[in-house]
Amino acid sequence: MEYKNLVIKASTCSGCKSWLDVCNGDCCKVFKVKTSMIRRARNKTVRVATLLNADLQYYYQLRGCRTTRTEIIIPITLFSITTEGEYTYFHKPCSKLDHNNLCLLHGSDAKPKVCQQFDPLKEEDLSNSRWFIVKSCVANYRKGGKFYKKEYLENNGEKNEINEIKE
Ligand code: SF4
Ligand code: SF4
């Protein structure tokens, strides 16, 4: 879908479910950590020093990691890994994401609270946060979003040099 149409679609989007055909639930397929917080460990794992409450531990366990109250222990052979800026990204779908990119825990108390509370339409400032907005997310195509360009709509037809997602 062209950027122009993504912006129009995003302006009336009511939430994740109506954007899934664009994003394919990408936010549930990757998490990031600050590269400087990673240290190598035995048995093909890396450890990330960070404070985790019970809900966050549960979240990272669903994502395929082991945890303690102070560490995420990541079995690196299970993930594909990329880096960008000061962050490292670990790619693998959450164990609770089904083949239609829907969360199997949606609507139940078993869904991690961090997942229940995240709302891509909130326009939160996530800089310096463990969370981030994936490129395909609706949040990027709404006013205030990273890739949103008001002038793009005004000058409809202008070449867009930012992120264009093709379906
Ligand atoms: S628990 Fe559900 S919402 Fe949370 S990361 Fe996994 S699939 Fe996504
Ligand atoms: S938060 Fe963004 S990327 Fe994740 S399911 Fe919702 S619209 Fe898609």
Image (tube, rainbow, N blue to C red):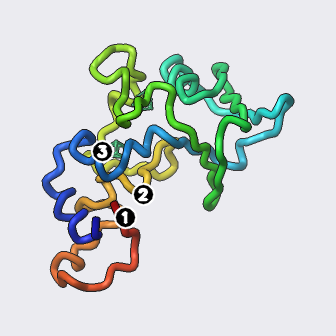
- Kind of residue at badge 3: Leu
**Left or right, residue 95 beside residue 51:** left
What's the distance in space between the residues labelled 2 and 1, CA to CA?
9 Å
Q: Which residue is mark 2?
A: 135
Rendered position, 106 above or below 134: above
What's the distance in space between the residues labelled 2 and 3, CA to CA?
13 Å
Q: Which disc is residue 80 wearing?
A: none
- Kind of residue at badge 2: Lys
* Circle 3 crowding by C-alpha within 10 Å: few under 14, some 14–19, many from 20: some
Marked residue nearer the N-terminal end (3 or 1): 3
Q: Which residue is mark 1?
A: 165
**Left or right, residue 54 beside residue 97:** right
Percent of width and height locating residue 40: 82, 38
Q: Quadrant of residue 27?
A: top left
In contact (CB < 8 Å): disc 2 and disc 1:
yes
Q: Secondary structure at mark 2?
A: loop
Give the mark toward the camera: 2 or 1: 1
Marked residue nearer the N-terminal end (2 or 3): 3
Q: Secondary structure at mark 3?
A: helix
* Circle 1 crowding by C-alpha within 10 Å: few under 14, some 14–19, many from 20: few
Give the mark toward the camera: 2 or 3: 3
On-image quarter of the C terminus: bottom left
Rendered position, 148 above or below 40: below
* Circle 2 crowding by C-alpha within 10 Å: few under 14, some 14–19, many from 20: some
- For ligand 2, tell me if the residue under mark 3 lies within 8 Å: yes
Q: Which residue is mark 3?
A: 20
